[in-house]
Amino acid sequence: MYYFSHLPSLVFLLPFFLYIHHVSLSSPLPDAFFKSIPSSLRQNVSDYYFELVKPLPSDRLDPSCSLLLLQQDFGNTIGSPPVSAPYSPPSDCPGPWTYVVLEFRASCQGEQYDRIAGLWLDGVEILRTSTAEPTDSGIFWQFRKDVTRYSSLLLQSNLTLTVMLENVVNDVFTGVYHVNVSMLYYAENTGVAERKLNRKVEFLKDTTNVNRINKAGKLGFADEFAVAVVQNFVERLGFQSEDKLGLISKETVYRSNRGDISEVVYEKPADLIIPICEDGDEDGFWFRIQSGLDVHSKGIQIPRNTRRAVLEIYVSFHGNDEFWYSNPPDSYLKLNNLTSGRGNGAFRQVFVTIDGVFVGSEVPFPVIFTGGINPLFWEPVVAIGAFDLPSYDLDLTPFLGLLSDGNIHYIGLGVTDSISFWLVDANLHLWLDSCSSAVQAKSVLYQTPALSIERESKFKQLDGSFEIEAKRKTEFAGWVNSTAGNFTTRVSQEFKFKNSIKFKRNGTYKETKQNIKVKTEVRVESDTGDLITRAIIKKKYPLNIITSTLPGSDNDTYLTTTNLSHALYEKSTRGDFSSSVSNTQVSGGWMVVKDHSVLSGTANTHQRLNYKDEFTCYSRAVAASNGTLLEDNSTSACASSSSS
Ligand SMILES: *[C@@H]1O[C@H](CO)[C@@H](O)[C@H](O)[C@H]1NC(C)=O
Ligand SMILES: *[C@@H]1O[C@H](CO)[C@@H](O)[C@H](O)[C@H]1NC(C)=O
Ligand SMILES: *[C@@H]1O[C@H](CO)[C@@H](O)[C@H](O)[C@H]1NC(C)=O
Ligand SMILES: *[C@@H]1O[C@H](CO)[C@@H](O)[C@H](O)[C@H]1NC(C)=O
Ligand SMILES: *[C@@H]1O[C@H](CO)[C@@H](O)[C@H](O)[C@H]1NC(C)=O
Ligand SMILES: *[C@@H]1O[C@H](CO)[C@@H](O)[C@H](O)[C@H]1NC(C)=O
Ligand SMILES: *[C@@H]1O[C@H](CO)[C@@H](O)[C@H](O)[C@H]1NC(C)=O
Ligand SMILES: *[C@@H]1O[C@H](CO)[C@@H](O)[C@H](O)[C@H]1NC(C)=O
Ligand SMILES: *[C@@H]1O[C@H](CO)[C@@H](O)[C@H](O)[C@H]1NC(C)=O
Ligand SMILES: *[C@@H]1O[C@H](CO)[C@@H](O)[C@H](O)[C@H]1NC(C)=O
Ligand SMILES: *[C@@H]1O[C@H](CO)[C@@H](O)[C@H](O)[C@H]1NC(C)=O
């Protein structure tokens, strides 16, 4: 991916300046490319691109209403301020809604790099996305993202939707991105409401449920909250199997209600969302992080009645850190006289501070954009997370003792060891105690051992190996006494990071292996020390890339052969509700490249997604070759796909 906004005039005048350091054949550092294969040489290429994800629960429903918020052509937008459009909820279904879904549609034709884009509502980021690279004959794509968690914001009128997508259009790069952004609202229609009411009556007949509601009541949650508990479970049942409505047995009802209130606490949208970001009128709202020392912060004042706080981090990596997981140390570049800036080793983590004090970190999932490594791998199925980049939640409730004191506090964001550049911002989701004007809160545990990191580096000229192992376990706790009760929240996070980079055959063969494992646990305890609820989330992101580069038959071209596999695994238990997702992609192929332009090549990509929770299963496997989707199998049957 190319992203020029810091040096627009320089880039404009000297487009070839940027190419110089990539021509070296002796070091196959991964890079960003664009496709330059005439359509006459390509047969049956798919024009519909997609990211393989689990369908949204709302997909089987008809939206009650929808709004086209923005229709925009992103041509030569480099250096221009972001575009904006007014936002107000739809007058024909003003909310509240069961679901709100953002729909992003785009099309493009010609030659173009992939580009990064951000969407914000009054500075709150609601989507980070990257574009697919077009072909001569044109492509289009669309995807949906559940944005229900931003409901408190979406209910407000007169907000500004801002979209930043910097693109370059000139004689070489001809692709203009045509983008439509819509919002789909799912209100409860009367039919559904009636069925739900019936189910609610049935639900309340079950004493287990009544006990549960009483428990919620005893814990001091407002009535409204108890009702939300009921509704949440009933909704889950309803959407689970609309067609089998009459057949829901008592057991099913019971099973669905073993889940603890944490699930609701987790899923219920926040009452207030405060953006932690730049003033976005000129360059977008994201903080541009240029180095490991570059910490950006914003002063905020939160309501004194905040009873829960979660920071959602959005992040993407660009420039010399686009492939941070495959960057060798600077000493390797320097001693071999390589001019590449892709160095500083391969460890990165986004970290968060409050008033300068570390409160958490996250090693991001290594999203590969559609021009990355070999662009032919990502057509028509893009890499995991390329259209809907994951965001990361950090529970800051243990720090409410500090944050909710009525004073201004500074939330900072930085990226350990980073080089230029990273685009990072965050949203602080806050749940308020509606029955009081202030809570009492105190931090009681702050445990962050220093990051343990070991680096081993051996090389002779262009061949060698570099290994990094890092880990840390942090634990924070704090109590919040609100009208709901006096609860202690304990948040522990343990991550393990391993990275190995090997260069062989005079540096023309490169092997990158990385694995990231993160385990997060959030426990909520009563003042007598009883466990009220807990969430455990385990994530694993393995990545393997083997690249071999040879001079091409033509002396200014080269041939790169690559094998790549990566995956995103996540298992979570929230209260009694467990789910697991496994999403793996395996690609192989070669390409002939001149500068950054892919002249020919072949690629195969296989992807499999398995999802399972207590009620539903979903599994989809696709195979693509040379830009054509060859196989696409999916099933919602649980039996056939229990492997994950
Ligand atoms: C292209 O698609 C047509 C029709 O599906 C098929 O007959 C033909 O063999 C395909 N060509 C290639 C090169 O895959
Ligand atoms: C955007 O919406 C307009 C108007 O409905 C439509 O003509 C156009 O095809 C849409 N573009 C994309 C990329 O979906
Ligand atoms: C939104 O803006 C319009 C026009 O400026 C104004 O009439 C309306 O009162 C505003 N609504 C809210 C909720 O601020
Ligand atoms: C790097 O450049 C220096 C100075 O030009 C030269 O002495 C050295 O041999 C070069 N090293 C390599 C590995 O080419
Ligand atoms: C805890 O908060 C509640 C509600 O705000 C309040 O009534 C109660 O006095 C507080 N408990 C203590 C020990 O301060
Ligand atoms: C590596 O480079 C050396 C010196 O240029 C050469 O003698 C040797 O054959 C090369 N090895 C390979 C595997 O290309
Ligand atoms: C809340 O509970 C914690 C832990 O049990 C206790 O230390 C603290 O004093 C309690 N706070 C209030 C206001 O009661
Ligand atoms: C390849 O290199 C040779 C010798 O350096 C040169 O004469 C020739 O023009 C080059 N060919 C191309 C296609 O660049
Ligand atoms: C890539 O995978 C293929 C098939 O598994 C294998 O034959 C080939 O040797 C691999 N290439 C590299 C560079 O490892
Ligand atoms: C993809 O292209 C390569 C090279 O042109 C060819 O060998 C291979 O059979 C093609 N794959 C398919 C599925 O057509
Ligand atoms: C799709 O299903 C067919 C028929 O069962 C099978 O042969 C094929 O391997 C499957 N494809 C994938 C990608 O799983």
Image: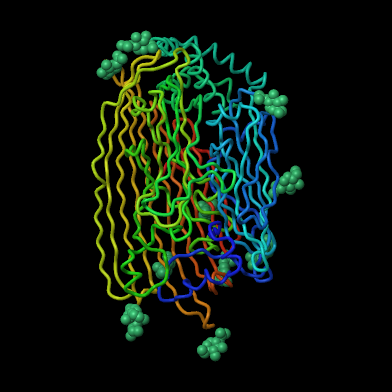
Residue 93 seen in this snapshot = no
Residue 547 seen in this snapshot = yes
Q: Is residue 387 left or right of residue 182?
A: left
Q: Can you tell me which quadrant of the image ligand 5 is in?
A: top left
Q: Identify which residue, 80 or 250, lies in the foreground.
A: 80
- Quarter of the picture containing the C terminus is top left
Q: Position of residue 479 (x, y in %)?
A: 32, 22
Q: Is residue 604 left or right of residue 366?
A: right
Q: Is residue 553 left or right of residue 547?
A: right
Identify the residue at image location x=49%, y=32%.
274
Q: Position of residue 5 (x, y in %)?
A: 56, 56
Residue 544 vs 590, above or below: the answer is above
Q: Position of residue 131 (x, y in %)?
A: 59, 53
Q: Position of residue 640 (x, y in %)?
A: 47, 42
Identify the residue at image location x=54%, y=61%.
7
Q: Which image quarter: residue 139?
A: bottom right
Q: Identify which residue, 590 or 290, lies in the foreground.
A: 290
Q: Identify which residue, 81 or 121, lies in the foreground.
A: 81
Residue 238 vs 166, above or below: the answer is above
Colour scheme in the image?
A: rainbow
